Image (cartoon, rainbow, N blue to C red):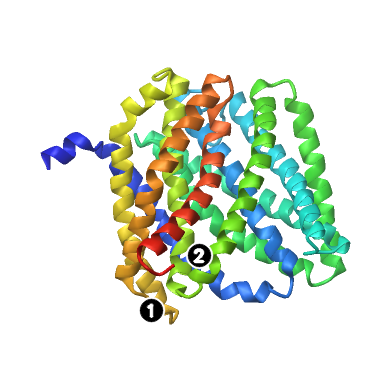
Amino acid sequence: MDILRRVLNRGVFGQSLLALAFNVGGVLSGRLAVIFTPIFMAYPWILAIFPLVLTVRGDISGVLSGKVGTMLHTGEIRPQLRGNTRSFHSLLSSIFVLTFVDTIGVGLLSFVFNLVLQQTSSENLIYFIVIPTLTCVLSMVIAIPITLFVASKAFKSGLDPDILVYPIMSTTNDMLISVIYVSIVSLMLRGVVYVVFMEALIVIIALASTVLFIRHIREGLFIRTLKEGLLLVLLSSVFGTINGLALKSVRRDVEKHPSILIVYPALMNTLGNIGSIIGSTETTKLALGYIKSFGQVLKDTVRGLLSVEAAAFLIHVLFGVATLAVGHVTDVAVDPFFIIKLSLFSNALSFLVISVFALTIATQTFKRGLDPDNFVIPLTTSVADTVSTLSLMTALTLLGTH
C-alpha cells in the first residue's frame, strides 16, 4: 500500500475513476445501437450523417470543456452561470457560431462525398444541411448549461474540472444527441410541413449566428476560437472517415460476437476520455506557466499517467460485469471473462499511444502560439476512435478470435 501511495496520485486516481465510470453508460448505448440500426437501413443517408454529427458535436464539446476548465483555473471566468465575465460570454458566443458554421460545412462535405460514391442523391441535400445543423445546435444549447454546472460544481468543491467535465459530458452528449437526431429525422420523414418548419429554424439560427459574430468580431478569444475551431473540425472529419473505414474492416469479425458490439462504444469513449484527462490537465499547467517542454511534461506527469491508468484498469474490468448485465436483460450471450480480457488487452495496447499523443498536441500547439484547448480534446478523441478500433483488432488476434 505504501508503494501504491508513492506511485499514485490519490486525487487524480479518485477523480479519474469517477469520471471514467460514466463510460459504463456506453455499454447500454452500444446495445441500443445494435437494436435500432436496422430501422434506418432503408435510408442510407441517415447512417451517413450520424457519425459526422457525433464527430462535430464531440469536437465542439471538447473545445468548450477544455476552455472552461482552463479559464476557471486562470480566473478568466467565474464558477457561476449568471453575472459572469466578458470572456465567458465571448466563449459561449464563439461556441454557438462555431457549431452552426461547422455543421453546415461538414454536412455539405458529407453530401458531396456520399454523392460521388453514389450513396445518396441530389434531392437529399436538404437533409445533409438541416439535420446535422439542428441536431448539433439543439444539443449544444442543452449541453452548455449542463457543462457549466458540472464544471462550476467541481471547481467549487475543490475537484479538477479538467479531469471530470469532458468524460461526464461525452457520455451525456452521446445519449442527448442520439435522442435529438432520431427525433429530427423522424419528423422530417413525416412530410413537407416538418421540413419547411425546420428550414425556418435554420434561418433563425443563421441570423442569430450573424448577430453574435458582428457583436464579438473585435474580441480576440471569439475570433481565435472560430479560426482554430474551423480548422480543427475539418481535420477531425478526416479522422472520422478513417474511423469509418477501420470499423468497416473489423465489423464482419466483430459481428460474430454480439457482446463485443455492446462494449465497443464504451471502449472508444473511455480511451478518448483518458486522453482528454491527460491532455486537458496539461493545457491548464501550460496556461499557468507550470511546464514549458514535452520532456518536462513527461517527467512531471508520470505519476498522473499511472493514476489515470489505474482507474482505467478498474473501469475496464467493470465493463465485463456491465456487458453481462445488459446481455442478460436483452438476451445476448456474454462471456464476461472474455470481455474483461478483451477490454484489458485493448486498453494496454492503446493507453500509452493516446497519452503520448495528447501530451504532444498540448505542448506543440502551445509552443507554436496556438491555443491548446482548441486542439487537444477534439484531436485526441478523434484519434482515440481509430486507435481503439485498431487495438481491438489486435486484441482479438491475440485472443485467437480474429
Q: Quadrant of the N terminus?
A: top left
Q: Quadrant of the C terminus?
A: bottom left
Nearest the viewer among 184 and 355 is 355
Q: Residue furthest left?
A: 2
**Residue 195 in sight:** yes
Q: How many dots with numbers?
A: 2
Nearest the viewer among 223 and 235 is 235
Please give the name of the residue rendered at 78% of the width and 70% of the height, measured from the top-left corner.
189
User: Is 211 on the left-hand or right-hand side of 357?
Assistant: right
Residue 34, image quadrant:
bottom right
List x then y, in percent, for residue 198.
Answer: 80, 58
List x then y, in percent, for residue 234.
Answer: 68, 41
Tag 2 or tag 1, which sits nearer the N-term?
A: 2
Q: Circle 2 sits on which residue?
A: 29
List x then y, in percent, for residue 360.
Answer: 47, 31
Looking at the picture, which amino acid does disc 1 mark?
A: His
**Vertical side of 157 occupied by 292: above or below:** above
Looking at the picture, which amino acid does disc 2 mark?
A: Ser
Nearest the viewer among 76 and 371 is 371
User: Is 137 on the left-hand or right-hand side of 280?
Assistant: right
Give the structural element (helix, strand or loop) at label 1. helix
How dense is the environment of label 2, judged by Cα within 10 Å: few (below 14), some, or many (20 and up)? many
Q: Residue furthest bottom?
A: 331
User: Is 263 on the left-hand or right-hand side of 17?
Assistant: right
Q: Circle 1 sits on which residue?
A: 328
Nearest the viewer among 315 and 198 is 315
Please give the name of the residue rendered at 38% of the width and 45% of the height, measured from the top-left corner.
351
Give the structural element (helix, strand or loop) at label 2. helix
How dense is the environment of label 1, judged by Cα within 10 Å: few (below 14), some, or many (20 and up)? few
